[in-house]
């Protein structure tokens, strides 16, 4: 038996999210008395693959093919399912991002497996197999029992710490190839955004809402983000008004993120917005309305006008960084 984990790579490199997944899978494997086995898809160098053993991977199965460098959900699901059956996996661990959400239901059908999505902790018990997850847009928690022999877990980003548990590096090259009938995605052009921190990767995010009043007032917010090395985000009404680009929209209908620190500036805290940011470890809210829902979700809050509070925060950050 084994716990199989699929850590996505970006241009042949793994990110913190990948190490979170392997750390989690390793601990689940320890609970079950099984091996933690990684399946890597795409061209990844041996040195990069070897990093996964640092976080508890007993074995790394590498499937290399230049045609696999671009994610194709159907083809990937077929190969991961084949590996899962070969290693007799009882648990499959994926990320709870767009990739994991696309792969999980396909794997569920192929493996006849139950799914628990957005899990944030180790299983409550293994017999029966029960996991804990947020429900109702992060307003409550639930213990979910998965009764099928194979279980699929999608792990919420930034919910499990990266734990070093070094194992000998064991890399196995696999000859599994994708079903050409499933390879339907063709990449014609790649355009990369440079000089901007991706929201899904950012440890700190500074976000603004309609309380910023005008797109002309965004200067201090952007300056604060630059001083913190943070990503910039916004609520849906702001992106709909064209004040900020749509790729900065966070919330239920935008990007779902889980940074260590999230600044909600002039954001009231509608449930749709909280659904996208509720997994943040710490939320700092700045709003003129002391009864705004955002204060219920925030660990820290400032009741005040963003146009007056932000310049003072920027001034203080500059002072700190100059020391």
Image: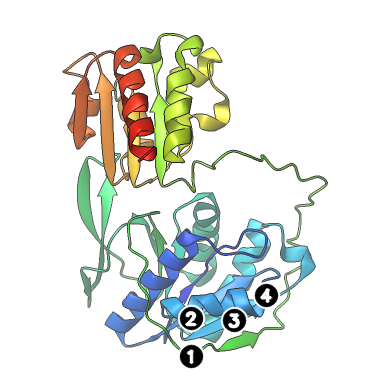
Which residue is denoted by mark 4 in the rendering? 45
Q: Distance between the residues labelled 4 and 3?
A: 13 Å
Q: Distance between the residues labelled 1 and 3?
A: 14 Å
In the rendered image, the vertical position of residue 108 relative to residue 140, given as above or below? below
Residue contact at pointers 1 and 2, CB within 8 angstroms: yes
Which residue is denoted by mark 1 in the rendering? 168
For marks 2 and 4 on the same chain, the one whose residue lies earlier in the sequence? 4
Q: Distance between the residues labelled 2 and 4?
A: 14 Å
Q: Is mark 1 on a helix, strand or loop?
A: loop
Image coords of residue 100 (percent x, y): 51, 57
- Residue at 42% x, 76% y: name it: 55
Mark 3 is surrounded, within 10 Å at the Cα level, by few (under 14), some (14 to 19) or many (20 or more) other residues, namely many
Mark 4 is surrounded, within 10 Å at the Cα level, by few (under 14), some (14 to 19) or many (20 or more) other residues, namely few
Q: Distance between the residues labelled 3 and 2?
A: 12 Å
Q: Nearer the viewer, mark 3 or mark 2?
A: 2
- Residue at 42% x, 38% y: name it: 228
């Amino acid at each position: 038996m084994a716990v199989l984990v699929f850590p996505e790579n970006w241009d042949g490199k793994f990110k913190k999210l990948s190490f979170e997944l392997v750390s989690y899978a390793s601990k689940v494997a320890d609970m079950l008395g099984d091996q933690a086995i990684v399946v890597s898809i795409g061209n990844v160098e041996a040195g990069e693959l070897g990093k996964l053993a640092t976080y508890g991977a007993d074995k790394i199965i590498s499937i290399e093919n230049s045609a696999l460098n671009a994610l194709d959900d159907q083809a990937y699901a077929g190969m991961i399912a084949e590996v899962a059956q070969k290693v007799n996996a009882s648990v499959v661990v994926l990320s709870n991002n767009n990739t994991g959400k696309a792969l999980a239901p396909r794997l569920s059908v192929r493996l006849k497996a139950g799914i628990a999505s957005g899990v944030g902790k180790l299983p409550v018990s293994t017999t029966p197999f029960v996991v804990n997850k947020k429900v109702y847009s992060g307003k409550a928690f639930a213990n979910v029992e998965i009764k099928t022999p194979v279980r699929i877990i999608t792990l919420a980003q930034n919910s499990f710490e990266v734990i070093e548990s070094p194992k000998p590096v064991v890399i196995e090259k696999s000859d599994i190839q994708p079903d050409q009938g499933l390879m339907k995605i063709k990449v014609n052009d790649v355009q990369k955004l440079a000089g901007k921190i991706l929201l899904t990767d950012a440890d700190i995010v500074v976000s603004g809402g309609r309380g910023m009043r005008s797109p002309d007032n965004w200067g201090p917010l952007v300056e604060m983000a630059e001083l913190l090395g943070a990503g910039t985000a916004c609520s849906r009404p702001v992106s709909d008004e064209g004040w900020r680009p749509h790729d900065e929209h966070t919330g239920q209908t935008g990007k779902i993120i889980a940074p260590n620190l999230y600044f909600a500036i002039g954001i009231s805290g509608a449930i749709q917005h909280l659904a996208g940011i509720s997994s943040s470890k710490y939320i700092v809210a700045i709003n003129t309305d002391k009864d705004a829902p955002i204060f219920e979700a925030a660990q820290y809050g400032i009741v005040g006008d963003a146009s007056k509070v932000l310049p003072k925060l920027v001034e203080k950050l500059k002072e700190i960084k100059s020391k």
